[in-house]
Each structure stands twice: as C-alpha cells, then as structure tokens.
Image: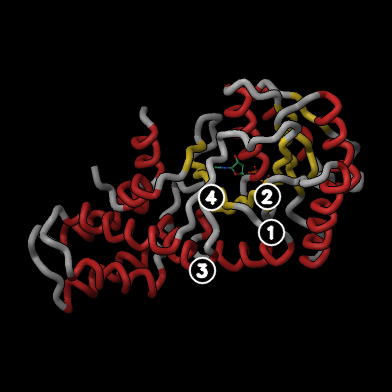
Amino acid sequence: MGIFDRLKQGLARTAGALGDAVARVLAPGRSLDASTREQLEAALLEADLGAEAAEALLDDLKRSDGADPREALAQAALRYLSAHLPAAPDLLSPLPLAETEVTLFIGVNGAGKTTTCGKLAARWAAQGSRVLLAAGDTFRAGARAQLEAWAGRAGVEVFTAAEGMDPAALAYDAVQRARAAGHQRLLIDTAGRLQTRTGLMEELKKVHRVCGKAMAGAPHRVVLVLDGSNGQNMISQARLFSEAVKVDGIIITKLDGSARAGALLPLSRELKLPVLMLGVGEGLDDLQPFVAADYCRALVGAA
Ligand code: GDP
C-alpha cells in the first residue's frame, strides 16, 4: 500500500463522517446557505477542528467555485494550515554535524514515545545511519524491555540503565557512549509520568541541560510526541512541555482509529510548531512524514 493510501486508511474514521457530510450537504456548484452551513459546521466540530477553524473553512468554502465538495474542503483546510503551520524540517535527513546527532523525545506516558523512537530508529538505520537508542524512562517497569524489543526490531543498539537510575545521569552516559562509539544518531526516550507535573518538567529541563554538558549543542532536536486521539487536548499538553524546554517539532501518533484527526488545524494555529511526522499504526512502517496536502485530502476522504 502506498504512503497516501496508508494515511487515508489511518484517517478513515474522521474522514468517513466528515467526507459524507460534505458530499451530502455540498452538491457540486451548490453554495452554502444557513442550513447547509450549520450541518457542515456540526461535522467539522465532530472532527475536532474547533470553532475558529470550522468558521474559517466555512467562510473559505463560500468562495468555492463548484469543484468536487471533498476536494474543495481539502483545499480550504490546506489554505488554513498553510497560513498557520511553520514549515517542518525534514527529520529523516541528518543535520550537517560532524558528530553524533542527539534527539530527545518527550511527551506524556502512553503518547507513543517509545514506539515512535523504535520506528524512527528503524528508518534511520535503514538509511545507513549508526543508531543508538537510550532508555531514559528509568521509572516505569517494563519501559526498558519495551525499548529493547524495539531496538531488536529496528536492528540497532540500545543503551539502558538500572531501574530507578537518575534519567539525567543516563542521558549523560548515553551521549558519551554514542560519541565514543561513533553513533551518528542518538535517540533518547524519556519518562512521561512522575508524581507531580512540576517534577516531570524539572526533570526534563535537567535531562536537556545535562545533554548539553555531555556534548555542546546537544540535544540537537527536541521532539514532542502527542497522542492524536486526544484531539484538541493536545494543545494544552503541548503548551506545558513547551514551557519547560524548547520544542523543535511534533509527532502525532494514533491518528489511525481517531475520530478527532481534524484537531491538527487548531493545533497549528495555537502552537505554531512544525508537525514532523504522523503515526498511523503500531507497526514498524507506520510512521510517515507529514505532508499537509496529503493530510488534508485524507482528512475528508478525497481521492
Ligand atoms: P510512551 O509511554 O509514550 O512511550 O508510549 P508507547 O510507545 O509505549 O505507546 C503506548 C501505546 O500506544 C502502545 O500500545 C503503542 O503500540 C501504541 N501506539 C503508539 N503509536 C501508535 C500509533 O501511531 N497508532 C496506534 N494505533 N497505536 C500506537
């Protein structure tokens, strides 16, 4: 299956309801009146676009020139995203560094950090990079085993520590090890749950700081992993993490099976953070670069 078809399949739950509503309400060439507008708005809110984005799209559609309704809505969504979403750096191409490139993965427990680290490690390894995965979640029983399993699947090395070890100390050692062993990419998975929110954020800051002590300029990228099935709740979560460390971009997971995939529109407006990749399943290959035009077409079930 091609990349777009996989994305389309992943967004099918959101696209089913939204696409049907658009096709039903907006016959080609028919313009929006109060009643069709209301019906469409309900479908957009259902897909979790939020009131502001829904209004913006409906206003935009008023100007639609009678194209295929799904296509017209996809184009309106794309115009909205293009106005708000910063261009994403290509996560798959290496930074021009002579040494190890360190990427820190942050996000709440269960967001999909470990899975995403595993998928990305596999991609990078397949491109010929020497990759090291570091199990920075030293609190959760099983987190280390889970990352080890992903390392095995991805065919890369893994750096672990005893359960309960200070995560910042682990990050320091992992950077040292990656440099000494000549790894081109180090991916540090972090913990997502602590007793208190403040504790988690303080720890993240410390891990971030310590990476820089182990290697000037590290971490080179900080990737925030968000669970797409949370819809617009992703926004407040992302704000919280952004206050602790500078986030370079977002990966949104679990869009497959989510009926709230439209939340990327308000998210783009609120956060102004690039979306790097999308997770559309639990398999090794179910992570794909974010292409706004493809996302918009998949969102409404356009061909
Ligand atoms: P972490 O606590 O942030 O490290 O989250 P995990 O990587 O352990 O993921 C939590 C659960 O979400 C696991 O069961 C994963 O298999 C699942 N998961 C992660 N990414 C995706 C995705 O893109 N799609 C689906 N359907 N499940 C995912």
Residue 253 at x, y percent in the picture: 54, 47
Q: How far is disc 4 from disc 3 in space, using C-alphas?
A: 15 Å
Give the amino acid at mark 2.
Val
Q: Which residue is mark 1?
A: 246
Q: Residue extending furthest left?
A: 29
If you read the primary sequence from the N terminus, does the residue marked by circle 4 or circle 1 appear first? 1
If you read the primary sequence from the N terminus, does the residue marked by circle 3 or circle 1 appear first? 1
Give the amino acid at mark 4.
Ile
Secondary structure state at the residue bearing disc 3: helix
Residue 71 at x, y percent in the picture: 21, 52
If you read the primary sequence from the N terminus, does the residue marked by circle 2 or circle 4 appear first? 2
Secondary structure state at the residue bearing disc 1: loop
Q: Nearer the viewer, mark 2 or mark 4?
A: 2
Secondary structure state at the residue bearing disc 2: strand
- Using the rendered view, name the quadrant where residue 156 is placed: top right
Give the amino acid at mark 3.
Glu
Whether the residues at callouts 1 and 2 have beta carbons within 8 Å, the answer is yes
Q: Which residue is mark 2?
A: 222
Left or right: residue 70 versus residue 140 is left
Label 3 packing within 10 angstroms: few (<14), some (14-19), many (20+): some
Q: Which mark is residue 270?
A: 3
Give the amino acid at mark 1.
Lys
Q: How far is disc 3 from disc 1 in space, using C-alphas?
A: 16 Å
Q: Nearer the viewer, mark 3 or mark 1?
A: 1
Q: How far is disc 4 from disc 1 in space, using C-alphas?
A: 17 Å
The image quadrant where one finds ligand 1 is top right
Q: Which residue is mark 4?
A: 252
